[in-house]
Image (cartoon, helix red, strand yellow):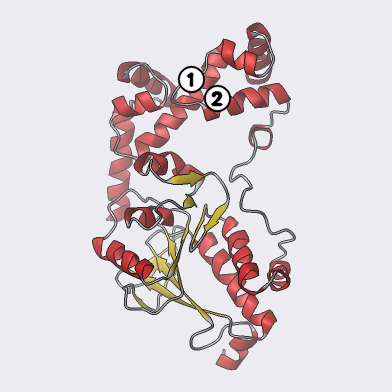
Amino acid sequence: MEANSLETLGVHHGRGKIHVGFLLCDTFAMLPFISSLEPMRAANRYSNEHLYSWQLFSESGQPVLASNGLSLSVNDTFSDEWKLDRLIVCGPHNPQPASSPNVLRALRRLSGRGVRMGALDTGSYLLARANIIGSRRCTVHWENMPGFRQEFNQLKVSNELFEIDGSLFTCSGGDAALDMMLTIVGNDHGQDLATKAAELFLHNTIRNSNESQRMSVVERDGIFHPKLVSAIELMEANIDTPLRSEELANMVNLSKRQLERLFRAHLDATPTMHYQQIRLRAGRDLLLQTSMSVLEIADASGFSSADHFSKRFRAYFGLSPTDLRQQHLGQRRSDKN
């Protein structure tokens, strides 16, 4: 296709008024990347101006493999020499391996020069490791939230779809990147242009940043009893220091016996059993996302000892915490090779 034809679609040659770089890490998620790029193209198209331009980078300058198996070519090797107005880091599926010192150094230097820094999905890990986030609010995908909060417990981490705090913008991933970038387009060039871009993508409502990443208990588990929903939400919010059944019942204005009947009727379990399953799943997340010891994970999951945690873990998942971690590490090495 000729360059002039692409320009009618919003793709221009040369630098736009705002030049954006994308740092793509191997196994980056394609959906948030596309969702953050397309609103800029739409803004160019509907304004008939060259408002945005973009450039793709990888650490090596070689094509990058996305998490869906597609390979994407990039424009160049990532370094701090590029003149960018904004940089968006598209993080890897598994953010645990050590980040490249060269990449972290380049991120710090670009930030120091006043480049606005953004992250999609697990990209917040790289910005945090480069000490760029500081006292500003940030977010990350809900699957990675336990490990991220454990590794960076001094940061202000939210559960929201996206965060825009000064020159820092971070997104939980998925199609939330579309809402974040449409909000940014609106901030840059007015709400009318952002609305036109949203309509192009059949996106009828630009979601606010403070909407939750995850479905509610009602949507996720098909539970509609309001007091049961409240009890489960309290359980999920109190992992490391579990509430006693009496406390839970009191907090949702029920007797202990009424609460137990409610759990049996809807979940075929006691409150204690269901709560323990929630804490075991939280422990599994920490086991796979952090280098914490089993003892530390047991404590963070509200268990009295590593032995008690391990026994319950094996009974629920079918293998010990150590075996699961070794299995996961083996799979990571296999994927890397």
Residue at coordinates 67% horizontally, 86% vertically from top-left?
48
Q: Which residue is mark 2?
A: 235
Q: Could you tell me residue 128's position as x and y percent?
A: 37, 53
At label 2, the amino acid type is Met
Q: Could you tell me residue 16's position as x and y percent?
A: 53, 83
Rendering quarter of residue 99: bottom left
Asked if residue 229 shows in the view, the reply is yes
Q: Say which label, 2 or 1, has the lower sequence index.
A: 2
Residue at coordinates 33% horizontally, 48% vertically from top-left?
96
At label 1, the amino acid type is Pro
Q: Secondary structure at mark 2?
A: helix
Residue closest to the eye, 286 or 79 = 79
* 48 left or right, relative to 330: right
Q: Residues within 10 Å of mark 2 (few under 14, many from 20)?
A: many
Q: CA distance from mark 2 to mark 1?
A: 7 Å
Q: Could you tell me residue 197's position as x and y percent?
A: 68, 71
Q: Which residue is mark 1?
A: 242
Residue closest to the eye, 123 or 185 = 185
Q: Secondary structure at mark 1?
A: loop
Q: Residues within 10 Å of mark 1 (few under 14, many from 20)?
A: many
